[in-house]
Image: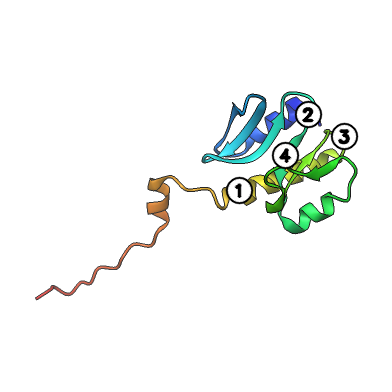
């Protein structure tokens, strides 16, 4: 995987946006919540959410480390695109997106539509 294919994959996710924050971090978000990031300055690295069990497995691989500040929440930083096979990296990015999207706040209109409507009684009120 290359930086461009990583970026293209992240932006192909429904509702994904990108922006640069903290000076040199390219962030990919879903509804305002980060699901992946890439450090634009050396040392380069991409950070994704893997969850506690998966992150423990990944930390056994050379080139993968606990992400600074958010590692305790299951985030990992992958030092280079060569640390994992392309398919595994794609799966990890998709998984990160799903984990974050599931907890990201919904827009008010979508949240309102998702709530069940109250039933109205056909009986007239006295």
In three-dimensional space, the C-alpha distance between marks 2 and 3, rounded to whole angstroms, equals: 12 Å
Q: Along the line of sight, which residue is nearer the eye, 29 or 9?
A: 29
Q: Quadrant of residue 82?
A: top right
- CA distance for labels 1 and 4: 13 Å
On residue 47, which mark appears?
4
For residue 100, the mark is 1
Place of residue 35 in the rendered image (x, y in percent of width and height, measured from the top left): 64, 42
Q: CA distance from mark 1 to mark 3?
A: 24 Å
Depicted 96 relative to depicted 120: above or below? above
Residue 118 in the image: above or below residue 35: below
Q: CA distance from mark 2 to mark 1?
A: 23 Å
> Earlier along the polypeptide chain: callout 1 or callout 4?
4
Q: Nearer the viewer, residue 125 or 108?
A: 108
Q: Is residue 1 left or right of residue 106?
A: right
Question: Which structural element holds mark 4?
Answer: strand
Q: Which residue is mark 2?
A: 44
Query: Do the residues bearing badges 2 and 1 touch, measured as CB atoms within 8 Å?
Result: no
**Which tag is nearer the camera, tag 2 or tag 1?**
2
Of labels 2 and 3, the one closer to you: 2
Contact between labelled residues 3 and 2, with CB atoms less than 8 Å apart: no
Counting residues from the start of the chain, the first of labels 2 and 3 encountered is: 2
125 left or right of 50? left
Q: Secondary structure at mark 1?
A: helix
Say which mark, if any, is on residue 82: 3
Say whether disc 1 or disc 3 marks the residue closer to the N-terminus.
Answer: 3
Where the N terminus falls, by quadrant? Answer: top right
For residue 100, side relative to residue 77 (left or right): left
């Amino acid at each position: 995987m290359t930086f461009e294919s990583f970026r293209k994959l992240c932006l192909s996710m429904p509702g994904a946006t990108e922006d640069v924050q903290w000076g040199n971090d390219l962030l990919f978000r879903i509804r305002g919540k980060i699901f992946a990031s890439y450090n634009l300055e050396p040392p380069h690295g991409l950070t994704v959410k893997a969850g506690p069990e998966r992150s423990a497995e990944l930390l056994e691989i050379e080139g993968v480390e606990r992400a600074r500040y958010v590692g305790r929440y299951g985030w990992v930083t992958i030092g280079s695109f060569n640390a994992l096979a392309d398919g595994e990296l794609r799966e990890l990015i998709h998984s990160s997106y799903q984990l974050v999207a599931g907890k990201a706040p919904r827009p008010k209109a979508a949240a309102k539509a998702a709530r069940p409507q109250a039933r109205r009684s056909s009986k007239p009120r006295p």
